[in-house]
Every structure is written in structure tokens, then in C-alpha cells.
Amino acid sequence: MHQRRNGNVKSDNGMRKGYNYSNLESGTYRKNGDTNSNIMEQQNNERISELSEQVARLKGLTIDIGNEVREQNSLLDNMGDNFGNVGDLLQGVSVKRIA
């Protein structure tokens, strides 16, 4: 065994009271259970949940837009057919006047 600078004693396996000192110099000192990792995973899960909600909203909007476009295309097709019929009627009327 040898003494660390902060006064804590390191055992042969690098463990003391639930703390892992084996990576102290590299800055990866963590209590068993990886609390930082758990916090980060929880934050990631929250962000994934928020993103999922936003994607669901966007999906709903795109479905609504698609329905609106189909409805307007149908109306435009009907208007085109009606104008075509009116044009045919007007041509028939002008032919009768000329004749």
C-alpha cells in the first residue's frame, strides 16, 4: 500500500469505501454505480422523449397538409372540369348565333 497525495490510502485492488481510485490521475474518478453516466443517460432519455413528441407533432402536421393538398387538388380538378363544360357551352352558343 502507498499514500495518495490527498491522504487517502489505496488498497491493492484500487478500491476504498466504494470509490474507484484506479483512474484518479486521468480524471475519470467516479463512485461505483457511475452516477455521472446515469445522469447523462437520464438526460438523453428525456431528450429522446422530447424529440419523439416533436416528431409525432410533425407527422400529424404532414398528414394534415397531405389531406388538405388532396382536397384542394380535387376541388381544382372539379373547377377545371366545370370550366371546360362552360367553355363547351359557350362555344355551342356562339356557333348558334353565327349560324
Image (cartoon, helix red, strand yellow):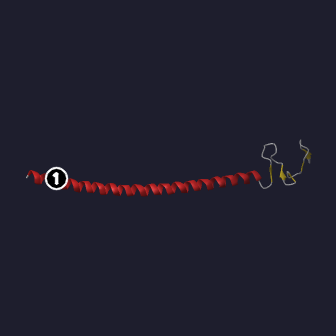
Q: How many labels does the image show?
A: 1
Q: Which residue is located at x 84 percent, y 52 percent?
A: 19
Q: Which residue is located at x 14 percent, y 51 percent?
A: 94
Q: Which residue is located at x 51 percent, y 56 percent?
A: 59
Quick check: 88 left or right of 13? left
Q: Position of residue 23 (x, y in %)?
A: 80, 46
Q: Nearer the viewer, residue 54 or 29?
A: 54
Quick check: 46 left or right of 17? left
Residue that mark 1 sits on = 91
Q: Nearer the viewer, residue 33 or 58?
A: 58
Q: Residues within 10 Å of mark 1 (few under 14, many from 20)?
A: few
Examine the image and state in which quarter residue 83 appears.
bottom left
**Which residue extends farthest top?**
5
Q: Position of residue 46 (x, y in %)?
A: 66, 54
Examine the image and state in which quarter residue 92 appears.
bottom left
Compared to 4, does 13 lie above or below?
Answer: below
Q: Where is residue 27 in the image (x, y as percent from the top left)?
A: 78, 43
Examine the image and state in which quarter residue 89 appears.
bottom left
**Which residue extends farthest left?**
99
Quick check: 22 left or right of 37? right
Q: Which residue is located at x 78 percent, y 46 percent?
A: 28
Tell me the SS state at disc 1: helix
Residue type of the residue flagged with mark 1: Gln
Q: Nearer the viewer, residue 84 or 58?
A: 84
**Which residue extends farthest front?**
97
Q: Where is residue 72 in the image (x, y as percent from the top left)?
A: 37, 55
